[in-house]
Image (cartoon, rainbow, N blue to C red):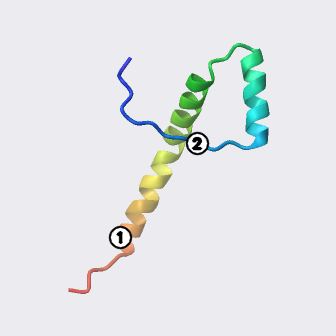
Amino acid sequence: MSKLTHIQRFRFTQNDMILFAELKKNRINLSSFIRKAFREKTERDLPKLIEAENKRKDKTRCPF
C-alpha cells in the first residue's frame, strides 16, 4: 500500500454517524468504506465534470 501524503478532515451529520455505528456493529472498516465510496463517486462523476469543464472553456473567449 502506498504511503498517505495528505490528511483531510470531514464533518458528518448525525445520520452519517448512526450509519457508521451500524457498520461498526457489522465489523466493517470505516476508513476503507469511506475511501471506496469516495473513489466510486469520483469515477462515476469524473466524465461529467470533465465534459462540463470543457464546455465552460469553449465558451470563454479571449478579448485580444
Q: Which amino acid does label 1 sit on?
A: Asp
Quadrant where the N terminus sits is: top left
Image point (73%, 22%), residue name: 23
Q: Where is residue 59 in the image (x, y as percent from the top left)?
A: 38, 75
In the shown orientation, is residue 60 left or right of residue 39? left
**In the rendered image of this protein, does residue 7 appear above or below residue 53?**
above
Instruction: State if disc 2 and disc 1 touch (CB < 8 Å).
Output: no
Residue situated furthest top in the rendering: 27
Mark 2 surroundings within 10 Å by alpha-carbon count, few (fewer than 14), some (14 through 19), many (20 or more): few
Residue picked out by circle 1? 58
Residue picked out by circle 2? 10
Q: Determine which quarter of the picture holds residue 18.
A: top right
Task: Return the disc, 1 or 2, that comes first in the chain's sequence.
Answer: 2
Q: Position of residue 7 (x, y in %)?
A: 45, 36
Q: What residue type is labelled 2?
A: Phe
Q: Position of residue 21 (x, y in %)?
A: 76, 25
